[in-house]
Image (cartoon, rainbow, N blue to C red):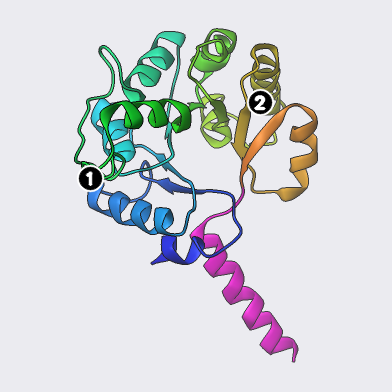
Amino acid sequence: MVSEVLGLTDLDVVCLDAEHSPFDRMAVDQCVFALRGAGKPSLVRVPSTQPEHLLNALDCGATGVVVPHVTSADMAREVVATSHFGAGGRGYAGSTRAAGYTTKPMPAHKRDSAAQTVVFAQIEDIEAVECIDEIAAVQGIDCLFVGRIDLTVAYGAASPKDDVVLEAVERICAAGARHGCPVGMFVGDLSEIPHWRERGASVFLLSSDHNFMLSGAAALRDKVAGG
């Protein structure tokens, strides 16, 4: 129902966090179904790079996948191959929602999937930052998605605004610009968006269903108390 409601909004995309939230395949399927019904693009942040997670999300009809802890160019290439049809890549089934439940001919489904499927590589480890140019150069990686909180933990920093973390994000943005690869990130502090836009970031995830509820409840309470 949350996905169905968000499908009624003017948000550009909804990302389902199946890495840190209790989404099984059925839950992902239901949410993607609701979003597709509203004409809303969907991303699934999968639990890991395991092929079955990518396959499940894309067969359910998700627009793309956000893949955690991509730490090398080789891993990035594997993720891209697993997300697309081809030799050694994504397994094919014509009975899925993505394939129109057998109504879409194979050539059309393969063509549309190749054109529309997006793959986000989450950059959230020191190893990934150290080889960011190699990852950014991998064909088929559609976005370098900054995992700033995990980078904070990885660098042993006290805050995502510590210099060592900000320098890592700057390196990721610069690599994306050099290789023509879009850069995205979650931004909790909206005042930071202009700063990162200037450095080439163009994809921003901005809030969560939890925050919508908490903020709405707080705003209601404040309004009543102030009245």
Q: What stretch is highlighted in magenta?
A: 206-227
* Residue 20: mark in rendering: none
* Residue lying at 44% horizontally and 21% vertically, measured from the top left: 70
For residue 158, above or below residue 30: above
Contact between labelled residues 2 and 1, with CB atoms less than 8 Å apart: no
**The residue positioned farthest toward the bottom in the image shown:** 227
Q: In this view, does 180 lie to the left or right of 227?
A: left
Residue 115 or residue 105, whichever sits in front: 105
The residue pinned by badge 2 equals 169
Q: Please give the count of numbered marks on the rendered protein.
A: 2
The residue pinned by badge 1 equals 101
For residue 110, above or below residue 195: above
Tell me the SS state at disc 2: helix
Q: How dense is the environment of label 2, judged by Cα within 10 Å: few (below 14), some, or many (20 and up)? A: many
* Residue lying at 47% horizontally and 67% vertically, measured from the top left: 5
The percent coordinates of residue 76 (x first, y second) are 43, 16
Camera-nearest label, 1 or 2: 1
For residue 79, above or below residue 195: above
The percent coordinates of residue 145 (x first, y second) are 55, 30
What secondary structure is the stretch in magenta mostly built from?
A: helix
* Residue lying at 27% horizontally and 29% vertically, measured from the top left: 106
Q: Please state which amino acid type lies under the numbered disc 1.
A: Tyr
Q: In which quarter of the image is residue 144?
A: top right
Rounded to the nearest whole Å, what is the CA distance between mark 1 and mark 2? 42 Å
Q: In which quarter of the image is residue 107?
A: top left
